Image (spheres, grey):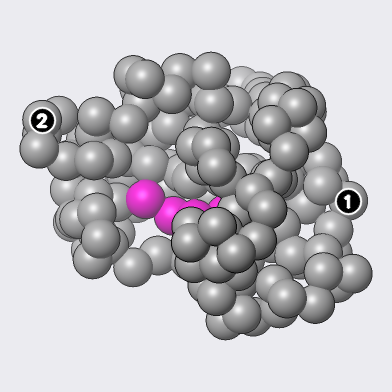
């Protein structure tokens, strides 16, 4: 853990947002104010900058866990598509944004989801409802756990 890293230090104060965790990975909902209900982050526990820095075993696990998280969110949110965004400039710690794509919410299509995020951050759009987020975390927790039953890294 790097104490100056916002991702490393985010897990402790936001423990209630954690939907699933293992020795190497943490799946947690975006902190409040969340841009959308179901906006999760899959973070490595080990402080590293990108997927390119994973060792071979971590790389295999990342693919398995990311797929399981995406399937769990797609089912829990009842959406046809789940986005994954990774930049690492604002927080140079491996974390993937996992975002449900509801076609009924046109303002979140493709790259517009970043504008939605910034609008919530600026107070121009309402954030996700806290109670809806809590319910989503519970549902995703169950679905990810079911997806990863018997997984050796869990």
The residue at the point 52 percent across, 72 percent down is 114
Query: Which residues lie in the magenta part?
Result: 95-99
Q: Which mark is residue 3?
A: 2
Percent of width and height locating residue 61: 42, 43
Q: Which mark is residue 116?
A: none
4 versus 49 height, above or below: above
The residue at the point 55 percent across, 67 percent down is 119
Q: Helix, strand or loop at disc 2?
A: loop
The residue at the point 36 percent across, 26 percent down is 11
Q: Nearer the viewer, residue 14 or 28?
A: 14
129 horizontally vs 94: left or right = right
Whichever of labels 2 and 1 marks the residue nearer the N terminus, that label is: 2
Q: Is residue 133 magenta?
A: no
Q: Quadrant of residue 26?
A: top left
Residue 136 in view:
no
Percent of width and height locating residue 32: 53, 37
Residue labelled with disc 1: 78
Q: Is residue 96 magenta?
A: yes
User: Marks 2 and 1, how far apart in space?
Assistant: 37 Å
Neighbourhood count class around disc 1 (C-alpha, 10 Å): few under 14, some 14–19, many 20 upward: few
Neighbourhood count class around disc 2 (C-alpha, 10 Å): few under 14, some 14–19, many 20 upward: few
71 versus 111 height, above or below: above
């Amino acid at each position: 853990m790097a104490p100056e890293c916002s991702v490393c230090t985010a897990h402790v104060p936001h423990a209630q947002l954690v939907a699933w965790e293992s020795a190497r990975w943490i799946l947690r909902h975006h902190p409040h104010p969340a841009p959308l209900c179901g906006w999760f982050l899959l973070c490595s526990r080990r402080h590293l900058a990108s997927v390119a820095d994973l060792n071979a075993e971590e790389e295999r696990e990342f693919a398995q866990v990311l797929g399981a998280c995406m399937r769990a969110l797609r089912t829990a949110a009842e959406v046809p598509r789940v986005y994954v965004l990774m930049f690492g400039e604002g927080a140079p710690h491996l974390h993937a944004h996992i975002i449900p794509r509801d076609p009924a919410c046109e303002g979140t299509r493709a790259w517009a989801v970043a504008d939605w995020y910034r609008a919530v951050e600026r107070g121009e759009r309402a954030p996700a409802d806290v109670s809806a987020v809590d319910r989503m975390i519970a549902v995703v927790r169950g679905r990810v756990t079911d997806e990863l039953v018997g997984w050796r890294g869990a």
